[in-house]
Structures are given as C-alpha cells and as structure tokens.
Amino acid sequence: MRSTRISIFVITLMLIGIGVVMIYSASSIPMWQSTGESAGLLKKQLFYVLVGFFAMFAAMAVDYHRLRKIVKPLFLIAVIPLVLVITPGISREVGGAKRWLHAFGFNYQPSEFVKIALIVYLADFITRKKHLVKDFMRGFLPPMMVLGLVTLLVLLQPDLGTAVSLVVLVFSMLFVSGARPIHLVSSILSALPFLYILVFSVPYRRARILAFLNPWLDPKGSGFQIIQSQIAIGSGGFFGVGLGQGKQKLFYLPAAHTDFIFSIIGEELGLIGTSAVILLFIALIWKMSSIVYNVRDPFGKLICVGVLTLIAFSAAVNIGVSIGSFPTKGLPLPFISYGGSSLIFHMAAIGLLLNVSKQEDAAL
C-alpha cells in the first residue's frame, strides 16, 4: 500500500496548495481594504499549514494501537472545550454563534478536534464490543448516548452542520461494523421530528431552507449568499475570468475565503478549475477506500472508515452548498477553505489513516 500512501500524500499537498493560492486570491483585496495588509490571511494560513504538517507527521509517528490505552482521556480532553465554548464569558462569539476559543492570538474550534476523538473512541468501543454490535442495549445504544452528548453540546453553540456531520460519521462506522439496519433506520426516523423542530423553530435556519428552495424569494436577504455563489460559478464559464480577477469576492459573496471558496475557484478558474478540484477529491476518496478495503485490523479499519467519511462528507456538502444543491451548512472545504482548526485536524486525520496503512504493511 506504499504507492497508495504516496498518492494520498501528494493529492493532499495539491489540495493544500490550491487552498493557499485561492485564499490569497479571495482575501487579498478585502484584507487590504480593511487592514492595509493584503497578505494577512495568507500568512496565517501558511502558519496553519506548518502546524498541520506537524500534526500529520505526529499522527504517523506513533503506533496507532497505543491510542487504545488513552482513548477515554483523549475523548474527555476533546469534550471539555465543547463545554467551555458554550460557557458565558469564555468563548468568542461570531455571528451569533459561540464555536471558538481564543488563545495566544488564534481561534480554536473544539468541534474539529472532537471529530477525531470520536472516531478513535468509537473505533475502540466497536472493536471491543464487536460481538455485541447487533445488540441494541449493549452494542448500539452506548454509541448513541455518546453521540447524543456530543451532538447536544455542538447544537448549543449552535452548529447544526457539524452536528449532522457527527451523526453521519457515527452511523457510517456502525453500518460498516455490522449494526442492524433496523436500529439505524429507526434511529434516523425517531430523530426526524427533532430535526424538523431544530430547523423550522429557528428563524435563520428556516430562512436558509426557504432560500435553498427558491433564493429569489429574498434575493437581498436569506437568498443573497446562494445567488452570489451561483453568479460566481456561472460567470467563470469554461476557463474562468483569470486568477485574481474575480469580482464576487469584492464584498459581494460573504465568506468567500472560507465556506464559499469553491465558488471563487469556479469564477476565476472556471469549469476546468472546479473539475480539477472535484477530481482530486474523488481520487483522494478512492485511494482512502483502497486502504479501508486492504486493512485487516478491525480497530485500524474503523479509524480509516471514520477519516474517509469525515473528509468525503465535508467535501460533498461544501461543494453541494456552493452550487445550490444543499442548504447552507457552514462546513469548510477540506484542505482548501481558510481556517486553522479545520486544516490542522483534517491533516492529522490523514496522518492517522496513513499510520494505519503503514502499520498494516509492517505486519505483513
């Protein structure tokens, strides 16, 4: 699997490189207008890339089996910041949401770390209780209780997009592990009324759904972001308007360097650029699937399934939101969107997957 690992590493580097270039393109003029320094976000992202490489190589350096000895403390360390972030006076509030802790001049989003911790915790639990995974009370309900706790803390921020991604992550790992489909389906059906309440009882979420169905009902309000995103992608045509020449980033498209960076790629690099990004993600997912298929260790296989689901779901949702196929969720495009927490922990997740593959080769 060495060639597969090299491919994954190279594809990840390519996506990170695209991200660095597009972040500078999307943010340079707005940053110069607001701070007088065009490369402010670029410098921060380059720093995050360096930290991400450290996290990736650290995740590759130690035998991943040792994580099983510290899985509970690791999960606790991940959950505590989720509690702190909703504690008044501690977290940083942006746009009405409390999702970040601020320290040493940087913002940290605890929900990104908890995804990795949840993958490792659930992989260990299922491996230990594999013979009980079909048992509702002893094999299925405990992971659901852990998921419920973490999801509740994330929803209190509030962050429905991350909460949905956690549910998809856990259900994917349970499905692969052999959990009864009736348990999975019944859990989904029982959660639908709560999801309906979460969406339609909150005005801005209800507005997002209505804007998704028809953004032109409120083109200057809830539908503005989706419309501007589609204008950006549509105006790019086949070849794009040219790198750095896009207009939508000039105070038209909100979050152009974060959640909607794919739209800027579409405007400036056109269909060729967006197709290249999508093909890179498809290739990355295909290579990760190959590792999942070839790993025999149950604990390692489940970790790889979790990492695969995490990256594939985030990429699919972000791109889907940008082109108007999904309601706005706020999930970043892995390795490309601006943001330290997302980039660092996605790189650490890749390192963990490569670690599993390397150990599998060593065991042969």
Image: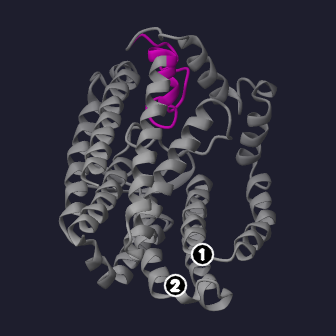
Q: Which residue is mark 1?
A: 178
Q: Horizontal placement of 181 versus 122: left or right?
A: right
Q: Which residues are magenta?
A: 244-271
Position of the N terminus, as image quadrant, is: bottom left
Query: Where residue 193 sits: x, y (%)?
Result: 81, 65
Q: Nearer the viewer, residue 69 or 299?
A: 299
Mark 2 and mark 1 lie on one chain; the one further toward the N terminus is 2
Residue 130, disc:
2
Residue located 59% across and 25% down the image: 229
Inspect the image, locate mark 1, and give the three-letter code of the amino acid beneath it.
Gly
**Residue 90 showing in the rendered view:** no
Dot 2: element: helix
Asked if disc 2 and disc 1 are in contact, CB closer than 8 Å, the reply is yes
Inspect the image, locate mark 2, and give the three-letter code of the amino acid beneath it.
Lys
Q: Nearer the viewer, residue 180 or 319?
A: 180
Position of the C terminus, as image quadrant, is: bottom left
Magenta segment includes 356: no
Q: Nearer the viewer, residue 169 or 223?
A: 169
Magenta segment includes 249: yes
**Residue 191 showing in the rendered view:** yes
